[in-house]
Image (spheres, rainbow, N blue to C red):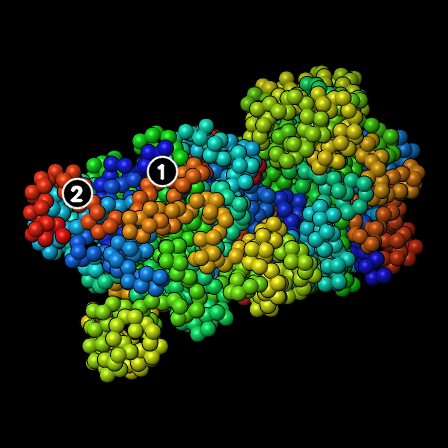
Amino acid sequence: MSMQALSSLKIVEWAEGVPGPYCGKLLADLGAEVTKVEMPGCGDRARKRGPFPDDIPHPERSGTFLYLNTNKLGVTLDVRSRTGAEVFKRLIEGADILIENHPPSDVARLGFSYENLKKVNPALVMTSITAFGQTGPYCDYSTCNLVSFHASGMAYINPSDGVDDIEQEPPLMGPANQGDLVAGLTGALTTMSAVFARRMTGLGQHVDLSQQEALVSMTRHQLGNYTVEQFPWLRAKEARRPGVSEVYRCSNGLVYLICNDERMWERWVEAMGNPEWAMTELFADRALRRENWDAGKAMVEEWTMERTVEEVVRLAEASRVPCKAINTVRESVHSELLADRGHFVDIHHGEAGNITYPGAPYKLSRTPWQVNRPAPLLGEHNEEVYCGRLGFTRQDLTVMRAQGVI
Amino acid sequence: MHELPLEGIRVADFCHVWAGPHVTQWLAVMGAEVIKIESHLRPDLTRSFFAGGKTLMPGLNQSVDFAVLNYSKKGCTINMTLPRGIELAKEIISLSDVVTENFGGPVMDRWGLGYPDLKKLRGDIILYSGSGFGRTGPYKESPAYAPIIDAFAGLTSLNGYSGGEPCPFGVGGWTDLTAAQHGAFAILAALHHRYRTGEGQHIDLSMSEVDCAFLPDAVMDYTMNDRVQRPQGNRDIAMAPHGCYRCQGEDNWVTIAVSTDEEWKAFCNAVGNPEWANDERFRDGPSRWRNQDELDQLIQGWTRNHTDWQAAGLLQEAGVMAGPSLSPQAVVQDRHLAEREFFFDMEHPEMGTVRLPRLPLNMNHSPFGKYEHAPSIGEHNDYVFRELLKMAEEEIAQLQEEQVIF
Amino acid sequence: MSTQKLPLEGVRVVDFTAIWAGPHVTQWLAVMGADVIKIESNIRPDAERAAFIRTTTEPTMSAVFAALNYAKKACTLNMTNPKGRDLAREIIKVSDVVAENFGGAVMDRWGLGYPELKRLKSDIILYSGSGFGRTGPYSELPAFAGIVEALGGMCLLNGYLGSEPLPMATRGYADLTSAQHGAYAILAALYHRSKTGEGQHIDLSMTEVVGALLPEAIMDYTMNDRVPRPQGNRDVAMAPHGCYRCQGDDEWVAIAISNDEEWRAFCNAMGNPEWTNEDRFRDGLSRWKNQEELDQLVGEWTGNRTRFEATDILQKAGVMAGPSLKVEDVAHDPHLAERGFFVELDQPGIGVLPMAGLPWKVVDGPRGDYEHSPALGEHNDYVFKELLKMSDEEMARLQEEEAIL
Amino acid sequence: MSGQALSGLKVVEWSDFVSGPYCGKLLADLGAEVIKVERPGTGDKARSYGPFPQDIPHPEKSGLFLYLNTNKLGVTLDVRTATGAQILSKLVEQADVLVENNPPREVEELGFAYKRLSEINPRLVMASITPFGQTGPYRDYRSCDLISFNASGLAFVNPSDGVEDPEGQPPLKGPGHQGDFVAGLSGAVATMAAVLTSRVTGSGQHVDVSEQEALASIMRSYLGLHAIEAMTWKRLKGSIPGMVSDKYHCADGMVYLLCGQDRFWAQWMKAMGDPDWAQNELFQDRISRRENWDAAKAMIEEWTRERTVEEVVRTADASRVPCRPINTVKALANSELAAARDYFVDVDHKEAGTVKYPVGPFKLSQTPWRVQRPAPLLGEHNEEVYCNRLGYTRQELTVMRAGGVI
């Protein structure tokens, strides 16, 4: 196992669902030793969520869980029991980082506030990924991907297109777990910054990540335009998409095509064979085009409808106009591109068998992303961690198990 | 005052538009000295973006998009089309730790600034390359436009209302920003590795892979079960109710998610319809899930008579996940974000006082990081050429003459 | 009401069993309504009829016998006499189950092995209970509970921490647990017969029953090659988990705490004495590791209360606790009384006495057939006249020939 | 499958730990189809109790659980949820027998009182195995093996021998979980009786098994002696009538030998070579022998101490005096007896591997005891039972899993 970028970091992940675990995954996949603490019995709630092979639910076969927990050590621990709390503190003593995503009040009640934990380990970086952060009037609100996504303004401006009467439709949550994953990603980022700060001060920090903020900052462009230009973001279609980037129907599917600056427009018109309509005053410049775009789009689509997705994409790319087919996951998994990049990796898991997983979206030339172990079985590393590292005896182990502590 | 994590780290930043600048945005706020390299020949595209707000044609230094993506950076202008310009860039790079770029193709190679060349300039250099489809593979020359990538990678096919058409993601530049944060994280990991080993490396990030990383459940449902998922709107694979409901007022919405029978009972009591809990159709999770349409009807009947905040407050009181669906403008007014100082006023030489969102970076319960206004084009030429490269007045004048510094 | 029908009504059992392990099998069958015909003779009565502890005037009746043979019928057959064995065959022909627990292959020697029985009645069910099984090296050896408990490993597990092996004081523990396994196997065989018409031979080994009741120890050995030792009243995880002295003469209360919540409840119930806050008892693992001290302190608390006070206080607090009852306490336990566990039997020669019933209770269902235990040969008339339809002369002759004896 | 005594009998085991599961095991090992219902997550409590291979706790590797649950189908179900309750009802509807060992009050509160279940399925035999039964003042007492064993009088008269000062020692519970086993056993007998009845009458019954009674009935001879001879017992050494020490030390171990009774006494004295002391008046009949037993035992032990266990046993066997070595389970497992009787069978289990299990303690010539399948993994047969038998779809399975119902 070649040295990895984060090999020296020891992390305790007391988190479940998506945000915390994705944060932990990002660190683990680059070599950090992440010890995942799960509730005895049910474990991480992601274990309950599909997809499952053949749709037969099984705690060790949740696609979501398998993906989010690669490269981690897994232990079970009921931190609410007194023994559990003691064991937890011993884990913290030896850790560089604690990732947690529990309601601040719960954390405090259990005695794991940063103030307490830093007494145990002053160098500890504690990253708390919560719905609305550690402070503020909503800090104890409970949330899920849906609520956070909508609380960020993103659902409001989604979707951009493809709906006829947007105002009749409610604001729209992004697909899958976008909101949770962004929170986890931002958590990894802010965690690393605390790791650097610690290099200088030798002291840990409490990273307070609000999922709402993580998501809100994804709309920084809209926010800026509102705060600075008082440009109100309405859900009315016409009010929304500057430029003429659109979905176009082709004879056998949909493409997405962008031609929002002059040069692209010219190249695109040329690619379409300089149709007369395009030469008219209505489309002379960007501002005009936007005003008259309904007409414009109709014309373009008339043209694309006569052609296949492949043709349109080829023609567009030939004239350096950004354009791609609107793919399903299947096409993207089988795309020449991702195959060529070796993006998808097959991982063998004791319970789930061989499955193809998405890899990392980046390649580090010297310290590659790698899968050293699949997601842990529930409590798989209890013995390794509790006996091997914390020095408990196996008898302690059996007692703690029977007491439901692990 | 905290010491900033990346103090002492210098970044030579060739990034432009969205995906790149957001990477260095994070580095800058974390304290790195980010030197943005543009020129009047090739200013960052976002300098000419406009949202359709009050200033229709903003000057190069007045673009909001640029302002929210480039604060805390320094700007200098170098004409990279001239050999001498490339020389200057090399001099800056040899004084830097990280080089970042997100060109539509191997521009760096053409300039003789590929990773092998950079390594010669500085053995431990870290080069970050962000692109739509990766620096290797068949599309390595394709320009990166988020919506195109989303279409290609399958994100678009999953975004939308159930049964409806796929909707391009309304959050302009969504994938630019998620990719950027993955990029920033990878850079921090590489820096961590460099601190321990003195080794630099090349980071090659592909935005299309970022999409896959964010669609693991859909991807694995396909790789495990050969199933192609479709848009599910605001619905969840298990929770019901789980949706966004219309409230009093114009285009006001509240989201509600119920995950257990207990929460359901709490919900029914909170909305003053305890009898719903005994309704056969809704008595338990699966029944509710099966009868979501009727359920959503009923709930909307209730939300209709409340404002989004009333509804959210009422339900959160009862321990039910709920929150308003905020528009960007509502986000700006949100009292919670206000209390957490998520928006800050920044003096901008040409735009005056602008209120911008900061990054979701909080340490020990307070906002954290370096926040300075985005640089006007070439604003820090003096600093860069005189202080950093120790060039004499005449030399600088000479280079300006020759349009090398331009 | 149909549910009042006893499950084994119409099932006849020829019962050659004696002492404890056998009779307790047929006792279950009898109470469940089977017509159990106990076969003895004056030359070979059930040894327990003469159990040494006795105040009864009745020579062939003892408390122990009475506790193990109620609801059965008894007849006397001299099995050493060919005619006696023929009579047995006659009875078997009109029966469904034959039960025996001889120390060896006695039935075979009598020509009443399973093959012969099958010929007499093809769907017959033969139950053979023995200490070591009807096959294998010890098939001819006599067995007693203590012996099989020793052999089966129970002695070496029963006892206080580090103590010597302690045979289970409850004489016949292995007898009675084996008997119930036997009764169960017979019911299963009857069920099979009711579906297929097939009978069969049941060969039960008491030694194996002991093993069946010690799976943790056996699996620990087969998995870890470890030989577990006596653990006294301790549990592998609970602490406190023990039996504590109370006020009064040799009176005790058993207490078990399985988690922190119960511990808190326990401490509150005791009025939170100082020591309950000590670190060594702070959490489950610590408590388990410091059991000696813990037991000491708990004992001090129970010492000032009667076992019933202690039980009451703790159960009210939701803590597992109960008095350690003496035999006479059990006999007068209000709970057992209210549930009608004891049945009043009018035992000729002894009088009306409350006998321990069987732990077989059907809600709103039949109470079971509880009749007094039979005197030796009490039902000869029923068996020979009613069942075998013999004339008085015939019967007289057979008595003469000492076939009926 | 066919040819087993109880094949065709459908049993639902809603039981935890030892008593109910042993009852279920007795039925399953003879061919009944036993569907074991475990709570999702932790499952049966026995899974948390050892022994575990190498003492590493693992929910699928508990020796106690593996032994107690051979031949059963395993499903997970939270009967406290509305859906869970519905499903249990469905299972009961199709079953001949329900074996449960839950607190009576809980069973009623959950709506599973026999009254209600018999409306769903009039043929149902419901066996309730609880510490103190369904009625009486102690019915709601919380209990475990220790409590029940003590409540039955067994602990008080245990041990018989080997303790110097019994009064100084507390009453003693039996090894392992004797109380729970005896209760489960009594439950199996009573259950079969009810099954036979319902075959005739077509209607079921509620079997009420009290562990206290099951154990007290083991005390029947004591209770008889108390009732008839008004005997009471003290724990003073030798004060328990009928209790004499039959344990003898040999040169290399101990034997248990019975020679008190007349028929054995003569044989044994002969075997020892008719020692003079044996002629003594003190030992002429069993009554006097019993009074002077300590003396007798001392003399006999003098003889046995000079011989090995093996010699003593051989001598005893030769003279048909009951005698066996006092064995460890190890000695039992390795005994020629166990081998000759095939008392141990290798069972292969997916998680625990191949381990030796004790077989049923009786052999049925026509319908042998058999291991059709090892103990179920937690929820192993959810799909088989819920989809194939109850007709739920896999999607509903997924929803129920996510909802924590299964």
Name the element at disc 1. Answer: helix
Q: Position of residue C140 (x, y in %)?
A: 64, 40
* As drawn, C281 above or below B339: above
Q: CA distance from mark 2 to mark 1?
A: 32 Å
Q: Position of residue D61 (x, y in %)?
A: 50, 44
Instruction: State left or right for residue B383 relative to residue A111.
Output: left
> Quadrant of the image for the N terminus of chain C?
bottom right
Q: Position of residue D364 (x, y in %)?
A: 63, 53
Query: Identity of the amino acid at label 1?
Result: Ala
The residue sitting at 34% across, 54% down in the picture is: B178
The residue sitting at 40% across, 41% down in the picture is: B367
Q: Label 2 marks which chain's residue?
A: B
Q: Label 1 marks which chain's residue?
A: A
> Quadrant of the image for the C terminus of chain C?
top right
Q: Nearer the viewer, mark 2 or mark 1?
A: 2
Whether callout 2 and callout 1 share a subunit is answered no
Tell me the residue that label 1 is attached to. Answer: A194
The residue sitting at 38% across, 47% down in the picture is: B345
Which of the labelled discs sits on residue B382, or is there none?
2
Name the element at disc 2. Answer: helix
Instruction: State left or right for residue A80 relative to residue A251.
Output: right
